[in-house]
Image (cartoon, rainbow, N blue to C red):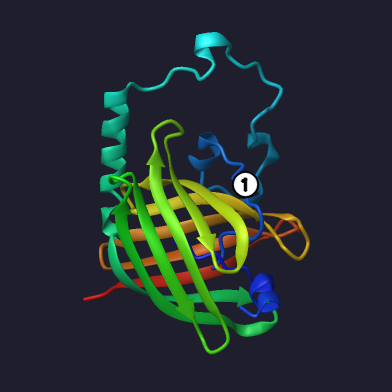
Amino acid sequence: MTIRMHPVMLLAAVGLAFAIGVSISDTSPSTLARADQPADDFFSSDEQPDDQRAQPEGDDFFGEQPDDAAMEQMIQEHHEALEVLEGDWQVRVRVFDPSLDDGIVMEGEVEREWVLDGMWLREHLVAENDQFRYESVSFIGYSPIDQVYQIVSFDSVSTGVFIDEGHLNEDTGEMLSIGSFRDDATGALVHTRTRFDISDSNRHRFVMYELGADGDERTAVEGVYERKD
C-alpha cells in the first residue's frame, strides 16, 4: 500500500512508488469523495483550495470542530476498518517502465502493527530483486479533523516525505486515495491516484496511477499482498 516506486528514480539510483523528493498532498475532501471520476477531471485545478478565500478570525479561526468524545469515537470507528491490514504479509510488486516489457518485479515482506497508543498503524516493508532493494516505513491513520485516511511514508531511496490521503468505501472494501511527489530527475510535481482493495482479509491488491505531463493517466505500480500463515 505504501510502496513508493518511480521507474526513473529506481533506475537512476540503481535501487515503490508513492513519492520522490519533497512531496506535498494537494487534495481536498471534496476531490477525494469523487475518486472514481475520469483522470482529467480527477486532478482538475478547479478543485484546489483558493488561498485568497476569506478566513475565519479569532476563536473561529479553526472553524467548527467535533468535541473530544466525538473525535475519539470517529478515530476508533475508522481504525477498526484498518485492522484487516495488521499482521505479517508477503508482497509482490511490479513497477511499470516503458523501457522494460515486464517492468521491474520485486518481492518482499511487510510487517504492520499498531503504535503510539493505537493512533497509527506502522508498516515496515522490504522488497527486492537481483538488482534492487527497497525499504520503507509508513504510518497509516485517520484524521477526524480532515475526515480522511492519511498515509505518511519514508523510504530508503529518497529523503522526501510522501503524504497520501483518501477514503474507504465500506461497501466495496476499496480505499481510494490521491497524492503527489516531486520527480528527482525533472523537479516536476507528479500527481498520483491509488486504488487499494482490502475486501479480502487475507489478500490485498493495489494499483497506483500517475498523471503524465501530457495529461494522460497511466498505471505506474501494482502489487499483491498475501497474509502469512
User: Does residue 25 sit above or below 182 in this rendering?
Assistant: above
Q: Position of residue 7 (x, y in %)?
A: 64, 73
Q: Residue furthest bottom?
A: 130
User: Residue placed at 67% from the left, 70% from the top?
Assistant: 9
Residue 77 picture quarter: top left
In the rendered view, does 99 fall on the left or right side of 174? right
Q: Amino acid at mark 1?
A: Ile
Query: Residue 3 in the image: x percent, y percent?
Result: 50, 65
- Residue 98 sits above or below residue 176 on the image: below
Which quarter of the rendered picture does the C terminus lie within?
Answer: bottom left
> Dot 1 corresponds to which residue?
24
* Residue under the point 55% across and 37% down: 28
Q: Residue at x 26, y 75 (%)?
A: 228
Task: Tell me which corner region of the image, top left, top right, bottom left or bottom right, holds residue 186.
Answer: bottom right
Up the image or down, 134 lies above or below 197; here it is: below
**Is 185 or 158 nearer to us in this picture?**
158
Side (left or right) of 169 relative to 2: left
Relative depth, front residue between 131 and 45: 131
